[in-house]
Image (cartoon, helix red, strand yellow):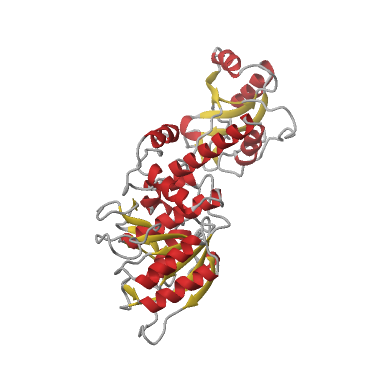
Amino acid sequence: MRLTALLVAATLSMVSGSPAARADSPPTPTPAASSSETQHPLIVVTFANVPTHPAGRAGTTSSRYTGTGYLLGQVAHEQAERVAKAYSLREVANWPIRALSVHCVVYEVPDDRSLETVLSQLAKDPQITLAQPLQQFHTLTDNSGSRYNDPLYDLQTNLTTLGIPKAQEHTLGAGVRVALIDTAVDTAHPDIRDRIAGSSSFLDAISGASAGSRHGTAMAGLIAATANNRIGIVGIAPQAQVQVFEACWQLKPNADDAVCNTLTLAEALGAAIDAGIPLVNLSIAGPSDPLLTALIKAGIKRGAIYVGAASSDANSFPANVPGVIGVGGSEHPSGHPTVTAPSVHVLTLHPGAQYDFVSGTSVAAAEVTGVVALLLSADPHMTRGSIKELLRRSAESGAQANPSEALNAASTVDARSGDTVDASAALAQLEATRARRIAASSSSR
């Protein structure tokens, strides 16, 4: 309340005590007490105000309102001093209110009396027209639903579906490297440039490739767009690092459609394995391919985790490779994906510092890659198998409504393939498993 008193003293009109003070003149603050003093409540009191005014010229009619403004009457000024003395109050500020024909005074209660006691006493004073607390009011801008200042965050409805807001209270993907095997990425985009660890191209004469970075930029943004930079959106793992492996090329200048071939993908997959990157995103689909399958199996043996886009064809690469986390669209589930994620009109990045909505299971795969990055950040020792099982068991568990109930449900209900991933539930289960392991270890000692 002392801070309030200081602000009031600095901003409200303070009439000097002269009967000729004006309401429209600059306020003069009453000297405020030291801010180090004990905080005390403030009250507002009004008195009827009959202002003093000079005698009118011959032939004129007297009025409260003169050409010099609405004046403070001597009686109201004396009442203000009387009340301060009679009720042991300290005057903080005062000003005449022309619209109500009153004089208004802010007093401080300088002792330990309750506000109710003082107001009750003032209410019995016949010279006082109003006595009330000095109250505070607030703007109604709602910032309660977001911990981010990124202006398009509220349009990312996919994050809520995936349980990302609660998950990001615990981890943001720090320390995790993600290999993005896709088209080129606009590494200068202000919402992803700080998250790009490097970029390599594997396009060659066979591809007949032309420049284009729409699809790759969109996937990179979904995974790791920078948070709290006052720009655009928030990635699912906004502190992860993305290593770009350009193996696909854009078919048309203003379309997301892109293609890759066995050679470019093989070179990119091999490079990702050699770099020891633990998490690989493949937002592509195509025919079963022996060479590419062998490379993914080799990466899995080395501990890498692969997330791929699923299609209606259960035998399509890369989702058909055993061990790959195949991701379908939750809006239109088809085939037999491991899990699903939102895939229709999801907001992400486009080249040239642009943003747009994109659709398809490519989107869903990138989202789940971001979720896996969160899990790896929370526990870097998680294996591919444990992550895959955790995603499946957390899917559609209802953790967003009640994490503890979701955890119990997930431990008793068989995992169902193709349900929507819930990152919050997955992290809750991970933490519960840790707690049980620690408890078991302690009891065995």
Q: Is residue 411 left or right of residue 275?
A: left
Question: How many numbered circles does the render carry?
Answer: 0
In this view, the residue in front, 104 or 159, is: 159
Look at the picture and state if 109 lies above or below 317: above
Could you say which quadrant of the image residue 395 lies in? top left
Tell me where residue 98 appears, x and y as whole percent: 50, 34
Tell me where residue 115 appears, x and y as whole percent: 60, 19
Q: Is residue 64 visible?
A: yes
Q: Residue at x 66, y 23 (%)?
A: 81
Q: Is residue 195 left or right of residue 207?
A: right
In this view, the residue in front, 379 or 85, is: 379
Tell me where residue 367 appears, x and y as whole percent: 40, 56
Could you say which quadrant of the image residue 20 lies in? top right
Look at the picture and state if 343 lies above or below 116: below
- Seen as rendered, the residue at the extreme bottom is 205
Tell me where residue 275 appears, x and y as whole percent: 55, 69
Q: Is residue 33 left or right of residue 375?
A: right
Q: Residue at x 54, y 30 (%)?
A: 135
Look at the picture and state if 389 lies above or below 221: above
Q: Is residue 236 visible?
A: no
- Placement of the C terminus among the 4 image quadrants: top right
In this view, the residue in front, 7 or 55, is: 7
In this view, the residue in front, 411 or 63, is: 411
